[in-house]
Amino acid sequence: MPCLNNIMELPRPWHLDLLLEFFVQVLEAVEYMHAMRIAHMDLYVFNVLVSLPRNSEQFPEVPSGAVYIIDFESALHLPQGPGMQHPVELPPSALSSLGRTHFDPYAWDMYCVGKLFDDTIKIVWREKSLPWYVRWFTDWLIGTERGCPGVCHCRPSARLARRVAVAARFVLSKWRGIQGVGSRGLGWVRACSAWIAGGLGYGRQV
């Protein structure tokens, strides 16, 4: 396997476009695993690698900027998919800091993704303020639930989270393209942001 780079080794600071692209790629990978009924169970910053241009030069099959999840030692192949799987015992490497020994494995992965994103922001973000929707997004994934006794519906699925991240990336790209065109363009971005937030029960607008 090519020698890639963990988040601590990447150039920083990151701009918002790069941060959202990272979110999308991680969630695409988690969505795929969950569709295969696989829960990783140990998602954190050192189990996510990113390829840089120098990696692509050495290994042409590895595209620059691609995100990879590694270390499946604790992963579980489960009998049921997301929204149907009951809690399982957490492996030793994933013992919950929340005081729980059993967790819906898919919800646990999403909790870990939220913590992963929060830790990534602390490492790569250097601007004074973080956009409200990025902070809300990580908090949404981490959630307030601390271990449902049955199937967990408190956190978003990887599919829903990926769709929201893609929508945020799309709105940002459109905003970049229409900056300077006047109040009509700004109104379009406000409307899109309100639609995304309102559909998730979050009333704040940009």
Image: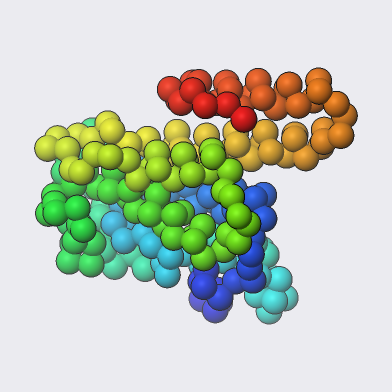
Residue 109 image point, x, y percent: 32, 50
- Residue 18 visible in rendering: no
Q: Residue at x 23, y 35 (%)?
A: 152
Identify whether 157 is placed above or below 88: above
Asked if one can make out residue 20 in the rendered structure from this viewpoint, the answer is: yes
Residue at x-position 73% and y-position 22%:
188
Number of numbered tags placed on the structure image? 0
Check the image and report above or below for 204 versus 76.
Answer: above
Q: Quadrant of residue 170?
A: top right
Q: Position of residue 147 (x, y in %)?
A: 18, 43
Quadrant in which residue 61 is drawn: bottom right
The C terminus lies in which quarter of the figure?
top right
Out of 126 and 100, give the one closest to the viewer.
Answer: 126
Which residue sits at x=42%, y=57%?
116
* Residue lying farthest to the front in this orientation: 128
Percent x, y for residue 201? 43, 22
Q: Position of residue 166 (x, y in %)?
A: 59, 38
**What colour scheme has been applied to the protein in the rendered image?**
rainbow
Say left or right for 34 vs 101.
right
Q: Which residue is found at the position 38% from the left and 62% from the top?
A: 44
184 vs 4: above or below: above
In this rendered view, identify the residue nearer to me: 89 or 36.
89
